[in-house]
């Protein structure tokens, strides 16, 4: 982060903007931490209600070594993006969906959570405070990372007595080093992402580090990422490490149904709605690995990955390549439709965007 920041928070709620854009090379932003100036912090009270939070300069947070998040992983996160339009205004995409998903996750994890209104207001405050970090149109997005964690002390296994809600932000470019080029995935036959009855269907912090090993092995072999099968039958498609998966066959789009082990992605849900609006038949159901391998197109969806085409999948030593070097027509069409709405290039007839 450049040392000379030109934004000041003069009190918990007043923010003074002095500059339009941060002084960085906007042509070269990766998906890695470049933390924006301010973060939002709110804590729960003893009755579980969240206090009004405040913007603080981005930096370390004090935390007891006994905190629930540190000892038992009691935490959730969200991922969202804000885009700058050509007229300078900034758009959020369906922020109330992230708020709701956090509340559902919190219920599963016995955590207190901010209300939808509190969450959305906090996201807006964070984006406004960090406005100069929202990339110019076409150069990326401001990635917003809301975190909810058990910050109060525990020793025996129990819900933490206090929760902290933090939002930080960072400008980002493409998630994969491939950029927009098709991904080369490998199916891991040993490791799984989620189990029935577990937490795969919520955005629990602890869902993500268990895939690091499979991901590291795959990356060492030159693959972009790992695709996981279900842990019971070991034959149904679940997810890629950080995103949902879709297959296209004869112009019918299918994606694994939400059944507790699949993350209910907001991009996934939006792509389904956009595709149906465009006249596609979209099925949410069990998708057999053989169907995946014989598909015309495969693509991934997620806030970070947006809509990423898959060029090849390797399963049991056999590599299947998808047509047109993996840049499928359906994925391209859905990418344009979705990002058009998110970036304000096309009219938002769905009512999904929110001006900050
Ligand atoms: C996102 O797509 O925003 C996520 O939360 C996935 C994360 C692993 C980057």
Image (cartoon, rainbow, N blue to C red):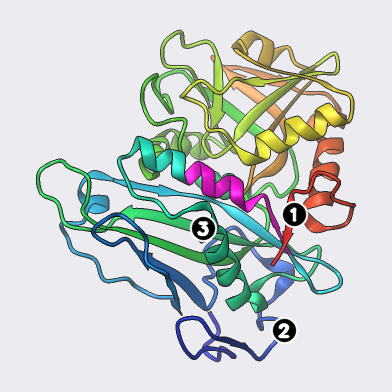
Query: Which of 259 and 111 lies nearest the eye of the viewer?
Result: 111
Per the rendered image, the range of residues in magenta is: 91-102
Does residue 35 appear to the left or right of 25 in the view shown?
left
Distance CA(mark 3)–CA(mark 1): 16 Å
Q: Residues within 10 Å of mark 2 (few under 14, many from 20)?
A: some
Q: Would you say residue 217 sits in the magenta stretch?
A: no
Q: Secondary structure at mark 2?
A: loop
Distance CA(mark 1)–CA(mark 2): 22 Å
Picture quadrant of residue 213: top left
Q: Residues within 10 Å of mark 1 (few under 14, many from 20)?
A: many
Counting from the top left corner in percent of width and height, residue 50 is at 37, 61
Q: Reply above or below: 268 against 51.
A: above
Tell me the quadrant of the picture where the C terminus can be found. Answer: bottom right
Q: Reply above or below: 339 against 280.
A: below
Specify whether tag 3 is near ligand 1 (CB below 8 Å): no
Q: Which residue in the protein does label 3 denote?
A: 119
Q: Which residue in the protein does label 1 denote?
A: 353
Specify whether tag 2 is near ligand 1 (CB below 8 Å): no
Does residue 92 appear to the left or right of 164 in the view shown?
right
Q: Earlier in the sequence, mark 1 or mark 2?
A: 2
Q: Which residue in the protein does label 2 denote?
A: 20
Distance CA(mark 2)–CA(mark 3): 25 Å
Q: Secondary structure at mark 3?
A: helix
Task: Report the residue at 51% width, 58% height from top.
Answer: 119
Task: Report the residue at 29% width, 46% height from top.
Answer: 74
* Observer able to see residue 127: yes
Counting from the top left corner in percent of width and height, residue 144 is at 56, 60
Residues at circles 3 and 1 in contact by the CB criterion of under 8 Å: no
Q: Earlier in the sequence, mark 3 or mark 1?
A: 3
Counting from the top left corner in percent of width and height, residue 275 is at 81, 30
Task: Report the residue at 52% width, 65% height from top.
Answer: 122
Q: Secondary structure at mark 1?
A: strand
């Amino acid at each position: 982060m450049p040392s000379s920041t030109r934004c000041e928070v003069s009190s918990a709620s007043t923010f003074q903007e002095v500059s339009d854009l941060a002084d960085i090379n906007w042509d070269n932003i990766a998906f890695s931490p470049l933390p924006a100036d301010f973060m939002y912090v709110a804590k729960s009270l003893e009755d579980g209600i969240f206090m009004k939070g405040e913007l603080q300069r981005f930096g370390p947070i004090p935390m007891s070594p006994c905190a629930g998040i540190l000892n038992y992983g009691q935490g959730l996160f969200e991922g969202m993006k804000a885009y700058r339009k050509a007229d300078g205004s900034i758009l959020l995409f369906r922020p109330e969906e992230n708020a709701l998903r956090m509340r559902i996750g919190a219920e599963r994890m016995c955590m207190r959570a901010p209300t939808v209104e509190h969450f959305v207001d906090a996201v807006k405050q964070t984006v406004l405070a960090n406005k100069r970090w929202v990339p110019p149109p076409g150069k990326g997005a401001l990635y917003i990372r809301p975190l909810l964690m058990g910050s109060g002390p525990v020793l025996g296994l129990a819900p933490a007595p206090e929760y902290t809600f933090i939002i930080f932000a960072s400008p980002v470019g493409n998630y994969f080093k491939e950029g927009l080029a098709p991904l080369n995935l490998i199916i891991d036959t040993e490791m799984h992402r989620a189990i029935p009855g577990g937490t795969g269907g919520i955005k629990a912090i602890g869902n993500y580090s268990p895939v690091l090993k499979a991901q590291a092995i795959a990356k060492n072999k030159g693959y972009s990422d790992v695709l996981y099968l279900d842990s019971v039958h070991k034959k149904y498609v679940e997810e890629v490490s950080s995103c949902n998966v879709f297959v296209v066959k004869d112009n019918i789009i299918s994606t694994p149904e939400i059944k507790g082990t699949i993350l209910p992605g907001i991009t996934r849900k939006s792509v389904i709605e956009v595709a149906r609006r465009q006249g596609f038949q979209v099925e949410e159901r069990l998708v057999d690995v053989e169907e995946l391998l014989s598909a015309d197109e495969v693509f991934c969806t997620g806030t970070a990955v947006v809509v990423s085409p898959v060029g090849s999948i390797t399963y049991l030593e056999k590599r299947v390549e998808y047509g047109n070097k993996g840049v499928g027509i359906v994925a391209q069409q859905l990418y344009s439709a979705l990002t058009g709405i998110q970036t304000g290039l096309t009219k938002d007839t769905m009512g999904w965007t929110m001006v900050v």
